Image (tube, rainbow, N blue to C red):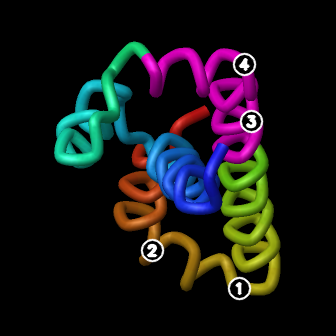
Amino acid sequence: MPPQSVQVREEVRALFLQGFTPARIADKYANQGLSRGLVSRWALSGKWAELRDGLKRDLNQSVLKNVRDGLKAMSADARFGLAPQILAGVAAVEI
């Protein structure tokens, strides 16, 4: 694989890990002859979906831990006042 192909594959991997679909990635790189099928094969052989899911899970757990730790450090009155924002934030976290 030429050096440029390695660079493109790393860029494609980064986009996939950010949540881009193989079709969307292929559209972005269509001028370089990259197909949805090739992106899908790369993702499958590299187990990118499993990696992306693990990264999401780790990030979500970290966010929830930080929120929990922050709440423990606050007074009860302050926690009560922030309840609507906290509920909105927790709802936005994918578990």
Q: Quadrant of the C terminus?
A: top right
Measure the alpha-carbon separation of dots 2 and 3. Answer: 34 Å
The residue depicted at 44 percent of the width and 58 percent of the height is 89
The residue depicted at 60 percent of the width and 26 percent of the height is 42
Mark 1 vs mark 3: in front: 3
Direction from residue 46 to residue 42 in the image, left or right: left
- Report the magenta stretch's main SS: helix
Q: To which residue does mark 1 refer? A: 74
Q: To which residue does mark 4 refer? A: 45
For the record, the magenta segment spans: 38-57
Quadrant in which residue 64 is drawn: bottom right
Q: To which residue does mark 3 refer? A: 51
The spot of residue 46 in percent (x, y) is 74, 28
Q: To which residue does mark 2 refer? A: 82
Count neighbours of disc 3 (C-alpha within 10 A) and say few if under 14, some if 14 to 19, many if 20 or more: few
Tag 2 and tag 1, C-beta contact below 8 Å: yes
Mark 4 vs mark 3: in front: 4
Q: First in sequence, mark 2 or 4: give its number.
A: 4
Measure the alpha-carbon separation of dots 1 and 3. Answer: 35 Å
SS at badge 1: loop
Measure the alpha-carbon separation of dots 4 and 3. Answer: 12 Å
Count neighbours of disc 4 (C-alpha within 10 A) and say few if under 14, some if 14 to 19, many if 20 or more: few
Image: 21 above or below 87 = above
The residue depicted at 66 percent of the width and 43 percent of the height is 1
